[in-house]
């Protein structure tokens, strides 16, 4: 079951298959509100046009403020254009391949099923190509001025946009998102990032992912189902550190079954071009060795994309985690400026839903004064491997360290009907419960469609529901949701 650029899954790999040529990504057109740009003073200018900025801009505009947004990239941000949404569309191909394999011998013959990678990439672009225009038109219809170009501060209340000049505002929202972390090793220019990966016109035979986080595991699982040989190197002993360790190990074992190899305690030292591929030098337990790959993908984390804003000119303090803000998302050093999403140093995880509600909270505080603090309780997250790994609330060790008297309900759900039905035996759950209050402190799930079930646990954590209350829910049967009561 290989990715194919022709009709046969059994064809020998062609040179095109190993190509790093990328399918072009549509860019939003350059738009100025008017040729004269007479209006250069606004109540709010949002820097970056991802989900945090869009929500804040629309909220402030609907309240009667004059609002402008600016981005040097097509409107939509990482999630809609370069992350969550297109990634999960690519994952659909992997789901189909995996589902067919799991049902082999159970009535399905999977031998003729394969991923046509160019067609799958084109499918993602049916979504991403339309988004910048839709978002821009939506902003315009709400009275927001849309600007395009690189912006940087030239004063406490002024930015300069390349090609357009200077603009002043009473408030700014910094919502420029994140970018891949810089990896300083010889040959780092040969790294492919996740954005480029999703635009490749073909997948090569051998792919090496750097780092043991979301990007490496999610794209590694997709690539393996598409026929590539996948290796992930991770500096530590434990990948996906934010998730339950026991479930991570189950996922690692499941990945190995389909060709996702993990090398622990392994650091990247150098990348050297070697013919049509690369020779990658790595170090494991103080010993160096070379690994050969046709593509080396950066999955070693992301950092706030704020370095080009010249924050010092606006007296804005920032660190490695982003713009330093108070509990109301206001800059600690310049009261005119707020920050939200991946560009802000907050308690929130780098997730799109967090950026959305932080954008709304920042807008509310700019409009009404600092009254609202973001609520991060019960925000779930997921690694969209196949199957998916999810989490909400505390890990077991975090609950114990916080002094809770807990009970841990663990289930191997691989033989439960909802998983038996689809042939998946790799499924398990771990729920952390406070003995005194009977409330959910944390839930950790690995299995098909558990990305939906974790939302119920997120609601339980957010509202303080007890396990008794959760068990009262009457679900459609048979459905994955009907397993919820048995998980606690």
Image (cartoon, grey):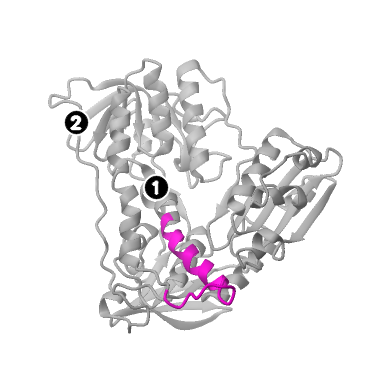
User: Residue 45: which quarter of the image?
Assistant: top left
Q: Residue furthest left?
A: 35
Residue 151: horizontal and vertical position, in percent? 28, 37
Mark 2 surroundings within 10 Å by alpha-carbon count, few (fewer than 14), some (14 through 19), many (20 or more): few
Residue located at (42% from left, 50% from top): 85
Instruction: Decide whether residue 332 is among the magenta residues.
Output: no
Q: Are marks 1 and 2 in contact (CB under 8 Å)?
A: no
Labelled disc at residue 78: 1
State the separation of the CA atoms marked 1 and 2.
Answer: 23 Å
Labelled disc at residue 432: none
Q: Which residues are magenta?
A: 89-112
Number of numbered tags placed on the structure image? 2
Residue 475: horizontal and vertical position, in percent? 69, 43
Residue located at (40% from left, 21% from top): 60
Residue 79: horizontal and vertical position, in percent? 42, 47
Residue located at (49% from left, 16% from top): 368
Asked whether residue 330 is in view, the answer is no
- Indicate whether 223 appears above or below 55: below
Secondary structure state at the residue bearing disc 1: helix
Q: Could you tell which of marks 1 and 2 lies nearer the N-terminus? A: 2
Labelled disc at residue 32: 2
């Amino acid at each position: 079951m290989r990715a194919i650029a022709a009709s046969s899954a059994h064809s020998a790999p062609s040179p095109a298959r190993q190509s790093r040529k990328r399918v072009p990504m549509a860019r939003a057109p350059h738009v100025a509100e008017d040729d004269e740009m007479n209006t250069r003073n606004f109540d709010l200018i949002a820097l970056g046009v991802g989900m945090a900025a869009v929500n804040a801009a629309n909220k402030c505009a609907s309240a009667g403020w004059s609002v402008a947004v600016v981005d040097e990239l097509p409107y939509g941000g990482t999630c809609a254009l370069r992350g969550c949404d297109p990634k999960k569309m690519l994952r659909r191909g992997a789901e189909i391949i995996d589902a067919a394999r799991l049902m082999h011998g159970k009535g399905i013959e999977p031998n003729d099923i394969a991923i046509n990678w160019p067609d799958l990439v084109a499918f993602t672009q049916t979504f991403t190509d339309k988004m910048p225009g839709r978002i821009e038109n939506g902003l315009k219809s709400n009275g927001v001025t849309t600007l395009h170009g690189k912006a940087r501060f030239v004063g406490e209340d002024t930015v300069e946009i390349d090609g357009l000049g200077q603009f002043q505002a009473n408030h700014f929202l910094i919502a420029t998102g994140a970018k891949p972390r810089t990896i300083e090793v010889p040959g780092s220019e040969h790294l492919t990032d996740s954005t480029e990966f999703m635009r490749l016109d073909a997948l090569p035979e051998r792919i090496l992912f750097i780092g043991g986080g979301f990007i490496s595991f999610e794209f590694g699982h997709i690539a393996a189902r598409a026929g590539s040989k996948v290796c992930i190197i991770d500096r530590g002993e434990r990948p996906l550190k934010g998730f339950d360790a026991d479930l991570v190990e189950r996922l690692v074992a499941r990945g190995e079954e389909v060709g996702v190899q993990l090398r622990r305690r392994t650091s990247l030292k150098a990348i050297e071009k070697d013919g049509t591929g690369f020779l990658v030098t790595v170090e494991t337990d103080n010993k160096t060795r070379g690994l050969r790959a046709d593509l080396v993908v950066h999955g070693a984390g992301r950092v706030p994309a704020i370095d080009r804003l010249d924050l010092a000119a606006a007296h804005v303090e920032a660190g490695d985690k982003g713009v330093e803000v108070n509990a109301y998302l206001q800059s600690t050093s310049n009261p005119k400026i707020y920050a939200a999403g991946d560009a802000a140093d907050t308690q929130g995880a780098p997730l799109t839903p967090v950026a959305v509600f932080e954008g709304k909270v920042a807008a509310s505080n700019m409009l009404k004064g600092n009254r609202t603090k973001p609520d991060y309780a019960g925000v779930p997250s997921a690694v969209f491997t196949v199957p998916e790994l999810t989490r909400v609330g505390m890990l077991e060790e975090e609950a114990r360290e916080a002094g809770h008297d807990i009970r841990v309900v663990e289930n191997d759900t691989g033989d439960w009907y909802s998983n038996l039905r689809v042939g998946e035996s790799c499924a398990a759950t771990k729920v952390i419960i406070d003995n005194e209050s009977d409330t959910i402190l944390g839930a950790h799930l690995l299995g098909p469609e558990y990305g939906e079930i974790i939302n119920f646990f997120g609601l339980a954590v957010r509202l303080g529901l007890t396990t008794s209350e959760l068990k009262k829910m009457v679900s459609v049967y048979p459905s994955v949701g009907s397993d919820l009561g048995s998980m606690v």
